[in-house]
Image (spheres, rainbow, N blue to C red):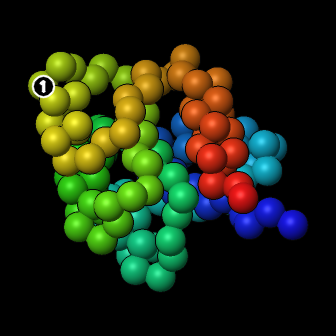
Amino acid sequence: MNKPFNILCVDDHGDSVTMLKVLLEMEGYNVTVACSGYEALEILKTQHFDLHILDIHMPDMSGLELCGKLREHDQRSPIILYSAGINDEQKKEGYKCGVTMFIAKPEGLETIIEVANAMRNDKRP
């Protein structure tokens, strides 16, 4: 039996994160949702994730800030910034803090699933 592949999705837009959660769960992933950066940090105190999907534009803490805090504790798990309107400066800052890749909202849903599938397959023995 394969080890579960756990994904944390962080987005302050309920519809967006719910759609992402449903699609990923249909692919067989265990998905945990947080609606803010601070909620995500609380979850990360007790759980480990194989993949993190973060919105960049959140009111309490940006996805870039959250990425930096996440990397203080987890240097290896991939981080996808999934957001609309990411500019070149944000991409540069994101790569510096450890973002694995950027995917545009909303058209990138299929790409997220493809990337998650590739990462899950890399983790299997």
- The image shows residue 116, relative to residue 108, as above or below, that is below
Looking at the figure, which quarter contains the C terminus?
A: bottom right
Q: Tag 1's secondary structure?
A: helix
Q: Residue furthest right?
A: 1
Name the residue carrying label 1: 89
Can residue 108 be seen at all in this image of the molecule? Answer: yes
Q: Left or right: where does residue 121 sit relative to residue 44?
A: right
- The answer to whether 30 is drawn above or below residue 45 in the figure is above
For residue 41, what is the image quadrant?
Answer: bottom left
Q: Position of residue 110 (x, y in %)?
A: 64, 24
Direction from residue 63 to residue 40 in the image, left or right? right
- Expressed as whole percent of the image width and height from the top left, the position of residue 30 reads 69, 59
Towards the viewer: 11 or 103:
103
Q: Residue at x 27, y 23 (%)?
A: 86
Against 114, is 48 above or below? below
Which residue shows up at 28% across the image and 53% down it? Answer: 67
Work out whether residue 60 or residue 71 is closer to the camera in this orientation and state it. 71
User: Does 37 sit left or right of 105 as displayed?
Assistant: left
Label 1 crowd (10 A; few <14 / some 14-19 / many >=20): few
Residue farthest toward the bottom in the current orientation of the protein: 46
Q: Is residue 22 visible?
A: no
Q: Indicate the quadrant containing the N terminus: top left, top right, bottom left or bottom right.
A: bottom right
109 or 15: nearer the eye?
109
Q: Give me the residue at 22% from left, 38% from top.
A: 94
Q: Amino acid at mark 1?
A: Glu
Q: Position of residue 109 (x, y in %)?
A: 60, 27
Q: What number of labels is visible?
A: 1
